[in-house]
Amino acid sequence: MAEFKLDGRMKVKTLKANFKKEFGASLRVYTTVACKTPADDEKTLAALRAEGYTGGELVVGGNLRVGNFEKKIAEKYGIGVQVADKEDKKLADNGATLVGAGK
């Protein structure tokens, strides 16, 4: 089973590249949970983290549903992410697994 680990020291560009490598899907990262403004690729997750959120390390498995993954990131870091297909053209179904989103 695919397992993915991220922490606050990770840059956005590294997070997106590692996610694509692990699951085959694209990851869009935003500065807020509302997913309005794309995050700067050079920022770390800790720098983006909203006040009052714990941040730290998060490990997820490939069988986690897309919607639950997006929710976990929002709850832990106070930022928004959206999982998209491998070409980054359309968003993945929230009911799909992370592994399934990249197929």
Image (cartoon, rainbow, N blue to C red):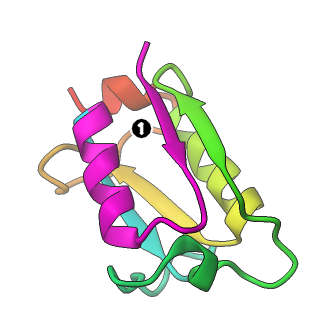
Residue 94 position within the rendered picture, expressed as x and y whole percent measured from the top left: 50, 39
Q: Is residue 68 visible?
A: no
The residue that appears at 34% across and 46% down in the rendered structure is: 19
Residue furthest to the right: 52
* Left or right of 92 on screen, residue 94: right
Quarter of the picture holding the N terminus = top left
Of residue 51 and residue 65, the one placed in the foreground of this image is 51
Of residue 53 and residue 103, the one placed in the foreground of this image is 53
Please tell me whether residue 67 is drawn above or below residue 103 in the rendered image: below
The magenta segment is: 1-23
Magenta span has 25? no
The residue that appears at 81% across and 85% down in the rendered structure is: 51
The residue that appears at 41% across and 21% down in the rendered structure is: 2
Number of numbered discs present?
1
The residue that appears at 61% across and 37% down in the rendered structure is: 59
Q: Which residue is mark 1?
A: 93
- What type is the residue that disc 1 sits on? Asp
Query: Which quadrant holds residue 43?
Result: bottom left
Please tell me whether residue 23 is drawn above or below residue 44 in the rendered image: above
Please tell me whether residue 7 is drawn above or below residue 11 in the rendered image: above
* Left or right of 81 on screen, residue 16: left
Which class describes the residues within 10 Å of circle 1: few (<14), some (14-19), or many (20+)? some
* Left or right of 27 on screen, residue 36: right
Magenta span has 16? yes
Residue 64 position within the rendered picture, expressed as x and y whole percent measured from the top left: 56, 27
Residue 86 position within the rendered picture, expressed as x and y whole percent measured from the top left: 17, 44
